[in-house]
Image (cartoon, rainbow, N blue to C red):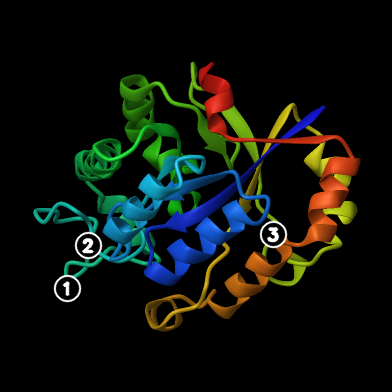
């Protein structure tokens, strides 16, 4: 039986995102989420997780969105103290990896204080970038948690679930699961990345991928999709599967 983790990224981004993810879990196929510890909706999200313990959580390590948790960084923030959304080659060349490590660790610890962490991934897949390998190796050795594999980079000793990241934009439709059936069944465990949300003002003003998230929620709660996955032998799991 093919095992599918349906992981909603960006939990904690905003209240609308949080509510959309919770709904897609309670009423749909979302089994897992990853939390952004640095975003305005974090506390709201943690309160919802307490009420919905069947939604298991990882950490969405963040280096390219909003503000860091730690305030003493010099090389990973702009003049306003915000993360670089799209770091230039010059920025990347001068990044202090110790700053990245301390920030990622602070984010992980903030989430771990509130909920059991099942796995790690990252915003914009930065944990799969080769220039951050020394940081991710340190994090992996410390926490020994499964990770989403979203690039060719792999750390020895880490358990990975292969990420299928094309449930996005024009691919968000009920037919997606039939059209990508072979990809969904290619690995023993597949992590289907998704971004369901209810749209709120913060999301509209801060992300170019905003109203599309409401459509993701619609598809992820579709009865047709749920029936298709059941009829095709999928077992919906979360990353705690690897921790047994």
Label 1–label 2 contact, CB within 8 A: yes
Give the class, few, some or many, for how many residues have Cα within 10 Å of label 1's Cα (few <14, many ≥20).
few
Q: Which mark is residue 116?
A: none
Report x, y in % for residue 41: 32, 64
Whether residue 157 is visible here, answered yes or no, is: yes
Determine whether 61 is above or below 185 in the image. Answer: below
Determine whether 134 is above or below 13 in the image. Answer: above
Pick whichever of labels 2 and 3 is earlier in the sequence. Answer: 2
In which image quadrant can residue 111 be found?
top left
- Left or right of residue 51, residue 232 in this image: right
Q: Which mark is residue 77?
A: 2
Mark pair 1, 2: CA separation: 8 Å
Q: Which mark is residue 80?
A: 1
Mark pair 2, 3: CA separation: 35 Å
Who's the residue at 28% across and 63% down the image? 83
**Which quadrant would the N terminus be assigned to in this image?**
top right
Determine whether 234 is above or below 196 in the image. Answer: above
Who's the residue at 85% across and 50% down the image? 227
Mark pair 1, 3: CA separation: 37 Å
Give the class, few, some or many, for how many residues have Cα within 10 Å of label 2's Cα (few <14, many ≥20).
many
Residue to which mark 3 is pinned:
220
- Left or right of residue 195, residue 104 in this image: left
């Amino acid at each position: 039986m093919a095992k599918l983790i349906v992981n909603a990224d960006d939990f904690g981004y905003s209240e609308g995102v949080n509510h959309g993810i919770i709904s897609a879990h309670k009423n749909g196929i979302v089994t897992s989420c990853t939390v952004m510890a640095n975003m305005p909706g974090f506390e709201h999200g943690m309160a919802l997780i307490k009420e919905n313990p069947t939604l298991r959580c990882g950490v969405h390590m963040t280096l390219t969105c909003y503000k860091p948790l730690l305030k003493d960084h010099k090389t990973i923030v702009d003049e306003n103290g915000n993360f670089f959304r799209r770091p230039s080659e010059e920025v990347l060349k001068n990044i202090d990896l110790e700053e990245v490590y301390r920030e990622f660790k602070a984010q992980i610890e903030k989430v771990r204080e509130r909920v059991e962490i099942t796995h790690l991934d990252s915003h914009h897949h930065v944990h799969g970038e080769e220039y951050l390998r020394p940081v991710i190796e340190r994090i992996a050795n410390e926490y020994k948690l499964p990770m989403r594999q979203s690039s060719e980079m792999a750390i020895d000793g880490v358990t990975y679930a292969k990420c299928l990241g094309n449930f996005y934009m024009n691919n968000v439709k009920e037919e997606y699961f039939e059209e990508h059936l072979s990809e969904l069944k290619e690995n023993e465990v597949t992590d289907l990345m998704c971004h369901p949300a209810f749209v709120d003002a913060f999301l509209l003003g801060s992300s170019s991928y905003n109203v599309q998230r409401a459509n993701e929620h619609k598809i992820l709660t579709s009865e047709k999709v749920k029936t298709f996955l059941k009829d095709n032998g999928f077992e919906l799991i979360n990353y705690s599967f690897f921790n047994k």
